[in-house]
Image (cartoon, grey):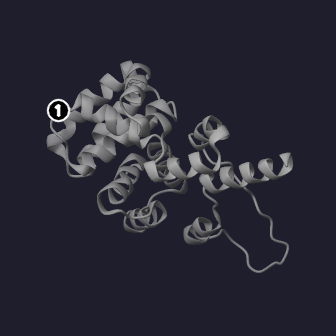
Amino acid sequence: MSSRFIAARALCLVLDQGRALDVAMLEAIDTFKIEARDRAYAQALCFAALRHGFAYQVVISGLVPKPPAPAVVALLMIGFADIAVLETAAFAAVNEAVSAARQLGLPYATGLVNAVMRRFAREHSQLLNAASGKSAQARSGLPSWLEAVLQTSYPEHMAQLIAALKLPAPMWLRVSLAGRRHGKLSLAEQATRQMSLAEQATRQMSLAEQATR
């Protein structure tokens, strides 16, 4: 199974069933054994799709008159992120998305996926700019409740926060000298050690605010 299939399956669990992304990824990975490289790429696709998810959903609603099935929405969002964020060549991203549709058991949707992905590949800058003009959530990339909290706490820094939260989270490497054990951490352990980008940004803004007092 491809990384796009794993990513779309996990994202569908998030969007349709309200699962946490880490839990959804672990479930998909445990069910379909894939290489570490593909697993990392699937996770990067999911993170990118969720960071820009509101804008992608506005684009999909504009290009597809009848609301598609949640699995199709998830796959298109993954495909959009593949092109717009991870900068995969358009022909490769389109082909991978169509292939993933078949793997997801959606052969009836391959024509739709192909057409929408090709349109997005040609016009993604214009489509995303138009989406930002139609929706405040598409513009900020934040759920309304989080935007309200940040606006109340850091009104003068909202532009910087919104820009920062659309970027990939930084990678943190931790070296343990305790010699507790050898080998790689499990995915569950990695997930528990990750700090969300929102938490990092909030902490940095709090420190900056304290420093200016």
Residue receiving disc 1? 65
Which quadrant would residue 128 be assigned to in this image? top left
Amino acid, disc 1: Pro
Q: What is the x, y in percent for residue 49?
A: 44, 43
The residue nearer to you, when weighing 152 against 194, is 152
Please tell me which residue lies in front, 136 or 49. Answer: 136
User: How many residues crowd mark 1 within 10 Å: few (<14), some (14–19), many (20+)?
Assistant: few
From the viewer's perspective, tell me whether residue 51 is left or right of residue 104: right
In the visual, does 151 lie left or right of 142? Answer: right
Q: In front here: 53 or 190?
A: 53
> What is the residue that sits farthest to the bottom in this orientation?
180
Residue 189 drawn above or below residue 144: below
Q: Can you give x and y, in whole percent of width and height, for residue 153 in the image?
A: 63, 51
Residue 99, compared with residue 16, is above or below; it is: above
> x, y (%) of residue 74?
32, 47
Picture residue at 37% right of the left edge, 37% below the top: 56
Residue 196 in the image, given as x and y percentages of width and height: 60, 57
In the shown orientation, is residue 115 left or right of residue 133? left
Q: Which residue appears at 23% of the width and 46% of the height?
A: 102
Q: At 34% across and 31% down in the image, what residue appears?
A: 94
Q: How many marks?
A: 1
Q: Secondary structure at mark 1?
A: loop
The residue under the point 26% across, 50% down is: 71
Choose between 37 and 79: the one closer to the eye.
79
| 152 to 188, vertically: above or below | above
